[in-house]
Image (cartoon, grey):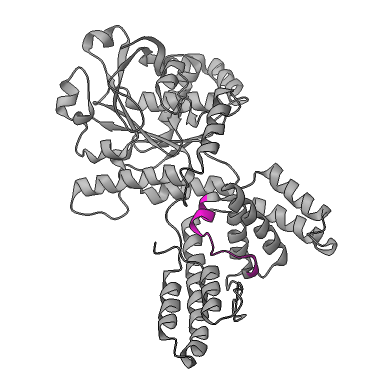
Amino acid sequence: MAETATVETLAQDIAQQMHAAPTEDPQGTLKQFDFDDDFQAKVAALALRDAVFNERTEGLVRPEFFENAAYATLVNMGLEYYRKYRRQPDLVTLKDIVKEAIGSKIIRKDMVDDIKGALIKLLKHDIGDRDYAVEKVADFAKHQAMELAILSSADLLQKGKFGEIEKAVKQALEVGAINDSGEYDYFAEIESRTEERLQIAAGLIKPNGVSTGIEVMDQKLYHKGWGKGELSILMGGAKSGKTTALLNFSRNAALLGYNVIYVTLEVSKKIAAERMDAGFANVQMKGLQDSVHDVRERIKDIGMRAGMLKIHEFPSGTMKPSALRRLLGRYKSKGIKIDLLVVDYLDIMAPEYRTNDPIENSKSIWVDVRAIAQEEQLAVLSATQTNRDGFKSSVAKAEHVAEDFNKIRTADIVISINATEEERSRGEARLYWAASRNQEGGFSVFIKQDLSKMQFATKVFKIE
């Protein structure tokens, strides 16, 4: 497959073509990064801390490319760990690996202080703008590979090995970043899948989902919550409670210790915060002024034991998926892993490149945001409108999505919010599993609500 060649494989192939022992650098021509120290530190920090970066640059980042010997040593450890476990070591594991290397004298005594200092720096270094770093590393590796191929061609030319020259140049042109998530050996990995299932059953591993905060809903979702790496959508007509639902699920996740970002494109962050205040404190919106101190104490108490909950406001129709990437990168650079990203809502985002086709623009937004969920391995929750028929229907189904059916194809699960006038008068609604990629659908969860207190679901009383 194109775009997966590496400098290392090219160097080994050229060595074999020249009838030399396969080495990592047959001509001794590989050079160090031509980036400044700060950018080399960013690359080293990404190699240590970001699995997606390592997936996309596999074979392109090599310890000997770094001018700083301490960076090179730590990167080598990080890459070895990644090759073995296909993930990055956590902080405790990384410190243990370094300690072990010092104890076994893999790290020389005179380098210990440098290694410790470099480790502290790399753990704190900004690792935002991953895509830019991947691109720069790939460009450097391609240049290295082409230079290696050209230098080796002189000897091959003298021997008349034109086919091998062509092969070397072609391989050099194929060096680049990998855009998939790496190979997965289906048959070989059955043991790891079995072990994971056993550990989940024993309660040793938590399910992959971010809890909705409603046990019955969690049990009806494949990942026991909003799936990480997936796009979950609430669908409803105007004033059906979509924003209230998004706010509720954000609060619930934070209460359970997850780190949550709530992006509002429709209402101000102040209004969003006030709605959260009402929900957390269980008071009506109009009663916030009458319970000022009680609300404050309630929120402060909850905040002491909750996960992170941040609200970001962007003007409607201006925020592109790339802005979400930068936002997540800002938190990642601080060492904060986001579990749930809530966007209110995708339909009023802007595409990266606007066309004259509204459906193409919509598709671009949805596909790009789902890609962010996959890349960052976080759950994304958002909402979308029903069309007119869906608004009139007692149950909004997949075919009732407004404007673009690609939304249904892109989302991993779509749950519609439904209520007749009679149900609304009783403070009730139905959540209908309208479409799902990984599980059965076509059923409804009946809930009690108190929308005056921003309580989207106070109780589940029936499933059918």
Task: Depth check: give the residue in front, 43 or 185.
Answer: 185
Tell how many labels: 0
x then y, percent, for residue 197: 52, 29
Residue 274, can we see it? Answer: no
Q: Quadrant of the N terminus?
A: bottom left
Would residue 79 be visible to someone looking at this image?
A: yes
The quarter of the image holding the C terminus is top left
Residue 62 belongs to the span the image colors magenta: yes
Is 50 displayed left or right of 215 in the figure? right
Q: Residue furthest right?
A: 109
Q: Where 110 falls versus 298 (above or below)? A: below
Q: Which one is in front, 84 or 380? A: 84
Judged left or right of residue 322, residue 50 is right
Judge left or right: residue 231 versus residue 197: left
The x, y position of residue 96, in whole percent, is: 75, 46
Q: Is residue 400 above or below residue 38?
A: above
Residue 374: quarter of image: top left
In percent of width and height, residue 214 lies at 45, 18
What range of the chain is rendered magenta?
A: 52-64
Q: Position of residue 377 (x, y in %)?
A: 48, 41
